[in-house]
Image (cartoon, grey):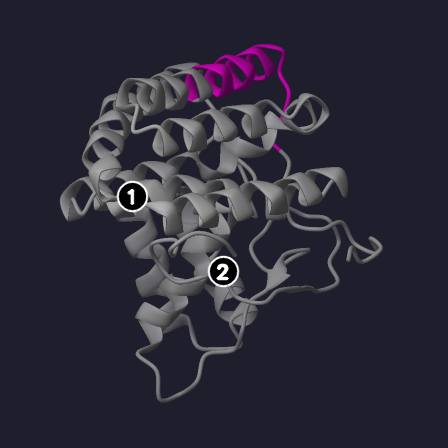
Amino acid sequence: MCGTGFIGPPPPARRMVSGSGLHEFGVGMVELDAIERSETLGQKVYERVRPAVIGGDFEPGEQGTIRSLARLMQGSPTPARAALNRLAAEGALEFGRNRTLFVPRLQPDRIRELYQIRLPLEDFAARAALPHMGKAHVDALTQCVEQRIVALGQHDYRTALELNRDFSFSIFEAAQQPIALRILEGLWLLAGPMMNLLFPEYADHQLGIERAREQIRAIETRDVEALCQSLRTEREEAAELILTKVGRGEVARSSRPAMGAASRG
């Protein structure tokens, strides 16, 4: 991807497996890499599933079981249980009946709370980051924007979302504030399943692209207030669009590729 390095493990290579369209982990889901026996199993399962949640591979309300995830990972239920329990502890999943787990449904109050927490923390991270950012950061962020434009032009929203995260976390990582960074990672994890509601509007009007360009200009000119204002405006625009769609009863569909979709290059 782009930037000086998105925090956390990169999303694994994915390919589709056949399914019936049921919203259950492992049915119509992307196939995650098999776990090597020499790896710490629970941690490795977690490191593969977590980016999928952040990237919108799971829809709000989508449910599954420990056994279905184990099949997806081509492994045993024990490490799958450890990974799902950890994601549940972080709030990314919730337990339902009979020990099933599901992605929390989109509720307006939950969406507002997430953004109200994110705004001041991202402002703090941006202010701390700017003194540490130089030409290398600007070049990497510019490349990231160019890649996002290509992805949006191909209607590859999944890649566009990954690049959006890369862009933002390249800024947050530069802050050298590990506690804030860890909290932000958790907040982005919770927000992942709702981000697909930004499309197609974000692609049609390139809303996020214009904000990203503003942020690059602010970094170049060392204008911390402009940087923070652009970040805040971008988040407020996103929250407004998501809340509007939720209010209309629209559903955030998974960003994983459709079955039989032509490959994009």
Write the residue at 68% across / 48% down: 22
Q: Position of residue 147 (x, y in %)?
A: 62, 47
| Quarter where residue 76 is shown | bottom left
Numbered disc in front, either 1 or 2: 1
Reply yes or no: does residue 21 show up in magenta. Answer: no
| Front residue (pair 229, 102) | 229
The kind of residue on which mark 2 rests is Pro
67 and 119: which is toward the camera: 119
The stretch in magenta equals 235-252
Q: In this view, does 254 lie above or below 66?
A: above
Res. 133 mark: 1
**Amino acid identity at mark 1:** Met
Q: Position of residue 244 (x, y in %)?
A: 56, 11
Q: Is residue 65 above or below residue 127?
A: below
Q: Residue 194: horizontal and vertical position, in percent?
A: 51, 31
Residue 11's disc is: 2
Question: Do we see residue 26 in this rendering?
Answer: yes
Assign a secondary structure to mark 1. loop
Give the percent coordinates (x, y) of residue 106: 48, 25
Q: Residue at x 43, y 52 (%)?
A: 3
Q: Circle 2 sits in a helix, a strand or a loop, which is it?
A: loop
Q: Between marks 1 and 2, how big is the CA–CA gap?
A: 25 Å
